[in-house]
Image (tube, grey):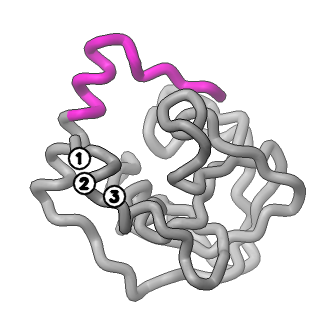
């Protein structure tokens, strides 16, 4: 898996300051993402939160890593309540919140879709998945949800 220092551009907050959610779900403007549904990454897990990021590239990667057969989609979302740092990729794995990843235990409204994003090269995705698989084999794929 690529190290953070190898890809600093992957942690830049989007110029709009918007929150993004990457998924394979087909959603419409006005729809709500709700806690209490199956995780995008572990279908056996019911998530207590809706996850989002201010980094467009992070949302793209989230869409690419999501399970399912649908097309990768990146939505602009608007939390309806306070958000908190996502402990799955912040203080538990990276000091602070360099990925600008957040979560909310309340509904998050879809306010738009980004369609001009660029996906990651297949080799990057293979390496990323291999890193996640290795983490799971070591028992390090703990989910703080």
- In the image, residue 88 above or below residue 30: above
Residue 31 visible to the viewer:
yes
Of badges 2 and 1, the one in the foreground is 2
The residue at the far left in this view is 123
Secondary structure beneath label 1: loop
Segment colored magenta: 131-145
Task: Give the residue displayed 69% in from the left and 44% down from the top.
Answer: 85
SS for dot 2: helix
Mark 3 / mark 2, whichever is N-terminal = 2
Residue at 51% of width from left, 53% of height from top?
99
The alpha-carbon separation of the residues under discs 3 and 2 comes to 20 Å
Dot 1 corresponds to which residue?
A: 2
Question: Circle 3 — which element?
Answer: helix
Magenta span contains residue 30: no
Labels 2 & 1 near each other (Cβ < 8 A): yes
Which residue is label 3 attached to? 64
Q: Quadrant of the N terminus?
A: top left
Measuring 42% from the left and 22% from the top, which residue is drawn there? 141
Judge whether 9 appears above or below 61 on screen.
below
From the image, tell me which residue sits under label 2.
6
């Amino acid at each position: 898996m690529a190290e953070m220092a190898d890809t600093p551009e992957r942690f830049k907050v989007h110029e709009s300051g918007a929150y993004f959610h990457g998924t394979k779900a087909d959603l419409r403007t006005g729809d709500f993402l709700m806690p209490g549904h199956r995780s995008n990454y572990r279908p056996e897990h019911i998530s207590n939160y809706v996850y989002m990021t201010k980094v467009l590239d992070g949302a793209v990667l989230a869409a690419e890593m999501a399970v399912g057969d649908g097309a990768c989609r990146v939505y602009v979302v608007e939390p309806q309540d306070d958000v908190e740092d996502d402990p799955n990729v912040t203080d538990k794995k990276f000091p602070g919140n360099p990925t600008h990843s957040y979560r909310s235990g309340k509904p998050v409204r879809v306010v738009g879709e980004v369609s001009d994003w660029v996906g990651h090269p297949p080799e990057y995705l293979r390496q990323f998945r291999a890193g996640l698989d290795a983490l799971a084999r070591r028992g390090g794929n703990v989910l703080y949800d």
